[in-house]
Image: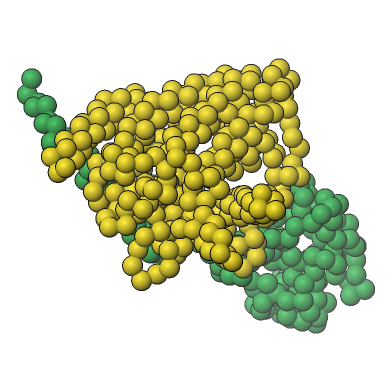
Amino acid sequence: MDMWLGVLVMLVKMAVVLGVALGLAAYMILLERKLLGRFQVRYGPNRVGLFGLLQPLADGLKMLLKEDIIPDGVDRRIFLVAPAVVAGTALAAFAVVPFGEGLTFFGHTVPQVIVDSNVGLLMVLALSSLAVYGLALGAWTSDNKYSLLGGIRGAAQMISYELALGLSLVPVVMHARSLSLSDIVAAQSGLPFALMEPVAFATFIIASLAETKRIPFDLPEAENELQAGFHTEYSGMRFALFFVGEYVNMVLLGAVTAIFFLGGWHGPFFPPIVWLAVKVLAVPVFLIWTRASLPRLRYDQLMALGWKVLVPLALLNILVTGALLVLNA
Amino acid sequence: MADKKPSLVGEIVEGATGLIGSYAATLTHLFRKPVTEQYPEYKRPMPERTRGRIILTRSPDGKERCVACYLCSGACPVNCISMQSEEGPDGRRQAAWFRINFARCIYCGLCEEACPTLALQLTAEFAFCKDDIADFVYEKEQLLVDHGGRHPDYDFYAHAGVAAGGPKGSHIGEDDPVDVKSILP
């Protein structure tokens, strides 16, 4: 009996998290288009439904009805799977993201997270590494030199910045003394880590910008040099899956930034879920603002920033944090 | 070398001000009113000499201005105007049929310049889409309007042409007919 109840609760939680993540991702596209429009002194899409609120629906329908073109010469199986890897890994990472403290129903405490894994942080990093496969394989099997160039750039960029991403999270783990995301949030009930570790926070934001392949780090796509990079040959729903992956990644990035650095659902006056929503949305808004503001980096600048600035900075920050922790203890 | 290499701190400060500047610029744009005009709801007034859909106008007395002289058809660089002339019941020349193929028209306005009676005019209307390209062939009934267009008071026949409205000498500025016998030597 208890086991079946557990399975049911787990399924409901998965459905809710999937729905929230995908819904947010769909509306993230609308938010991006609207905000980007306002940044460029124009209205975004405002025709479909009230204020254009049904635009994601119309876009989805359009993508579904489009022809799914598979070019000659592609490695069919991998070509078909690659977009799902990108979207799937981004969605899977939500499994370890907590949305609040446990809720109590009829004497049962249900944690607001699918799996409160004690290696949650590693899981997030691991899944973001796996997303490289979708991109690189999709590009490789497209049988197109622009795609291949984009894929190589993407793989090199994501592997380089993963290092800085992981290293920037080490001070967080040192403070929280746990890899579980719930514990990391609990450790920030006083001061969020963004204020305690501003250098780690900055490194994390820059590295995750590069991980999501967004402007100013959108070299794998680079419309004006590589057509569209790794997804040149994709069309219809498979093309849309790459975008679902990208925008789910944006939401995920907002969620993990909120949890690792902004104190999760902790905050005064308002209920926890409101604080979490505000913090989760703040990061994508910043990313969109960045997209409106900055030009694309040159490739050597990108690599220099990753290896010569972010990695040494993150390493130094770990040393300083460790020293301070030892001195305070 | 005259140029001094900027120090690391100077470089960081320069880069940071550059970044802050670009973020600030986009932020100020966020709070400006968008310059977009919401087209179907708001149609901006077009300039007076906009070259859009072609019409055939009428003189103040309500009669057709077109005298079927074929000058517009001859001036048309893409040959989209065709017509057949005939003589009307009052002795004036008019078009038996008049046809403009708007699918071919390039809206250059040469027909309007060629028109001697100010009958053919280009309007500011530019949005008239059709599903079928054959629907773009406009016949005389579709081209004729009930007003004088840009020149509402002009009447060609008051100045020249067949004196259908009155006797000889009744045109504006026309001398009375000369009695040839009075100028014999």
Colour style of the rendered protein structure: by chain
Picture colour for chain B: green
Please give the name of the residue rendered at 64% of the width and 22% of the height, measured from the top-left corner. A142
- Does any portion of residue A88 appear in the rendered image? yes
Question: Which chain appears yellow?
Answer: A
Please give the name of the residue rendered at 25% of the width and 29% of the height, measured from the top-left corner. A315
Would you say A59 lies left or right of A155 here? right
Name the quadrant of the N terminus of chain B: top left
Name the quadrant of the C terminus of chain B: bottom right
Q: Residue A85 location, x and y as percent?
A: 60, 32
Q: Residue B61 location, x and y as percent?
A: 77, 81
Would you say A309 lies left or right of A102 here? left
Between residues A2 and B75, which one lies in front from this camera angle? A2
Between residues A59 and A83, which one lies in front from this camera angle? A83
Q: Residue A67 location, x and y as percent?
A: 76, 37
- Does any portion of residue B168 appear in the rendered image? no
Please give the name of the residue rendered at 76% of the width and 66% of the height, measured from the top-left corner. B56
Is residue A247 shown above or below B70?
Answer: above
